[in-house]
Amino acid sequence: MRTSARKLVALGAVLPLGLALVACSGGSDGGSGGGGGGGGGAEGDNTLTVWAWDPAFNIYALEEAEKVYQQENPDFTLDIQEVPWEDVQTRLTTLAQSQQTGELPDIFLMQNNAFQKNVLNYPDLFSDLEGSDVDFSEFPESVVAYSTVDDVHYGVPFDNGTAVTALRTDVLEQAGYTVDDFTDITWDEFITLGEDVLAKTGQPLLSGQAGSADLPVMMLQSAGASLFDEEGNPTIVDNEALTAAIDTYQRLVESGVLVEVNTWDEYINTLVNSTVAATVNGVWILGSIQSAEDQAGKWAITNVPSLDGVDGATNYTANGGSSWAISSNADVELAQDFLATTFAGSSEFYDTILPGAGALANWIPASESDVYSEPQEFFGGDAIYSKVVGYAEEVPSNNTGAYYYEGRDAVSVAITNIMNGTDPEAALAEAQSTVEFAMGG
């Protein structure tokens, strides 16, 4: 996924205007003032502790949010502690099992795909946002859904994981196409176009890491489908959208339109070294693309292809993203007001962190600002940021549940086996059994 250590390193190295659009999160202790875990909830001292990762992205955003909030609350401070995502998850698990909730910070960042898992497994670690001033209608429904459990809101969306198709316009031109030919199309049409581009230019359109289910899972969400039903039971077998996604992925590879590589770094190199002419991924991938300064003006973005013949299919999906959670140990009133005033209420804040760190908002009103509407020369003068926020509003919601990662990993193995000749029905049945075993079934 997008927030792996390798991806954070690759994306975090790029920091001009369109920088690494990477999910970030972190933590802090209340009262301990530094290093390890500590407690939040220092009620009355106007200080909130936060756990988050990535100094150039999430922590920078927190520092700017602190400045905005201090305009009306000059005595307010954030105690920000840098905690890698993997450590955030480990700490939450440990504190839940030991019932030491007093060691929690006030606020911590949570990967979207892990949010429901943690709320369902460790409800005693969270405070909800019901009764706060956060207007959840000002965020895309699909993003809000990640941190909503039983119709109760537990998170404020932050960084944007909306997916885009990014295309090399100079390569398309050689083949007689423009980005418009790749807008609002199906995957069948994409493969047909890709085969023609390959024949005329010698360049495949896509690349991907072998053994990763990222692209098929993005296809799945584009139809509002999931690996689980509303009760959290796995639906890997007899899942029409999943079967179509895996079949589409297989045809992409067999046609030569998609080239598989072994590592994440190799995938990034296919983009910056002009091995391929396009990619379909979360918008954060644009940070890596822009590291190739010689390609400025040669890229454009559009929406993603839809699955052919699948009910609910759309041209919109997502990959990655994160949201802020308030802990059960928090000064809840202060934490709610801070998040509502900044991450859920300040265009000034988002206008600062977009050029400063490439932090693209999920907060829909941010897209109306002049900063979001500025033409981006790297992408042919297109106002890509306001465009992506518009895409985010169209992304279908889907259910991640408590075993999202187990489901994704099992499907990744199934795809690898199918690509190596295993019967698809047998491979998916094995994947479902693997998830059911992980769930204790």
Image (spheres, rainbow, N blue to C red):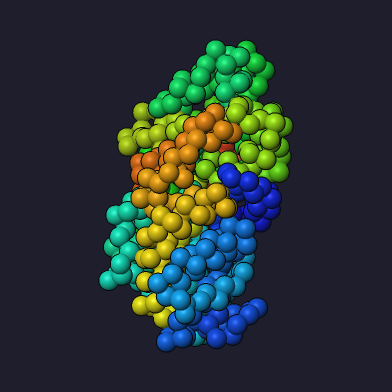
- The residue nearer to you, when weighing 47 against 171, is 47
The C terminus sits in image quarter? bottom left
Q: Is residue 183 visible?
A: yes
Of residue 440 and residue 24, the one placed in the foreground of this image is: 24
| Residue sitting at x 67%, y 44% | 264
Q: Which residue lies at the image location 69% right of the left edge and 28% below the top edge?
A: 275
Q: Nearer the viewer, residue 174 or 48?
A: 48
Count of numbered circles on the image: 0
Q: In the shown orientation, is residue 325 left or right of residue 265?
A: left
Q: Is residue 348 left or right of residue 203?
A: left
* Residue 254: percent from left, percent from top: 60, 25
**286 versus 50 height, above or below:** above
Residue 317 to residue 256: above or below? below
From the top left corner, tell me how far across and down residue 157 is, in percent.
42, 58
Residue 27 in the image: state x and y as whole percent: 55, 72
The picture quadrant where one finds residue 242 is: top left
**Residue 157 visible to an observer of this rendering:** no
Which residue is rendered at x = 55% and y = 49% of the image?
A: 355
Give the residue displayed 57% in from the left and 53% down from the top. Answer: 356
